[in-house]
């Protein structure tokens, strides 16, 4: 969600790295800055919060991240994400489509 093509896989890379580190060093703790993933959507809070919800779900629940640095006042649970943003934001986090970073603004 930065608008820079080279950054499109950052979320996936972090999630996969977290999973690998936890497999190799299960006792270690992993934290990450969540807003780095969505700074290209500044000013469009519902999109940013939706991206954060799906990133936290995949990074914490699926991969084992222990701490996410995020503004707690602006957090959503994935079920609170507006229906029209659910798939497009998860696509952006997981880089599932070439146009994934463009779609949240159109939703």
Image: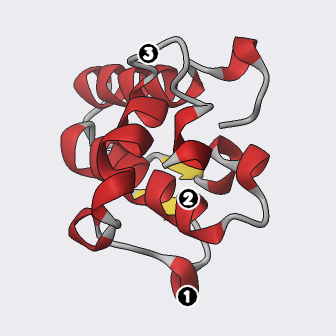
Which residue does the image show at 63% across and 42% down from the upper left?
37
Task: Check the image and report above or below for 4 versus 66.
Answer: above
Q: CA distance from mark 3 to mark 2?
A: 17 Å
Along the viewing direction, whichever of 34 and 24 lies nearer the viewer: 34
Residue 54 position, x and y percent, is 36, 50
Report the residue marked by disc 1: 73
Report the residue marked by disc 2: 47
Task: Check the image and report above or below for 45 versus 29.
Answer: below
Report the residue marked by disc 3: 97
Instruction: Identify the image's colour scheme: rainbow, by chain, secondary structure or one colour.
Output: secondary structure
Categorize mark 1 by other alpha carbons within 10 Å: few (<14), some (14-19), many (20+): few
| Image-quadrant location for residue 78 | bottom left
Task: Check the image and report above or below for 39 versus 68.
Answer: above
The local secondary structure at tag 2 comes to helix
Which residue does the image show at 73% across and 12% down from the upper left?
6
Q: CA distance from mark 2 to mark 1?
A: 15 Å
């Amino acid at each position: 969600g930065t608008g820079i093509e080279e950054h499109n896989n950052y979320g996936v890379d972090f999630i996969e790295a977290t999973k690998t580190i936890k497999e190799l060093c299960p006792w270690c703790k992993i934290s990450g800055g969540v807003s780095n993933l969505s700074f290209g959507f500044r000013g469009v809070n519902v999109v940013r919060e939706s991206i954060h919800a799906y990133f936290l779900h995949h990074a914490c629940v699926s991969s084992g991240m222990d701490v996410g640095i995020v503004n707690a006042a602006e957090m959503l649970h994935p079920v609170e994400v507006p229906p029209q943003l659910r798939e497009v934001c998860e696509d952006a986090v997981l880089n599932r489509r070439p146009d994934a970073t463009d779609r949240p603004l159109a939703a």
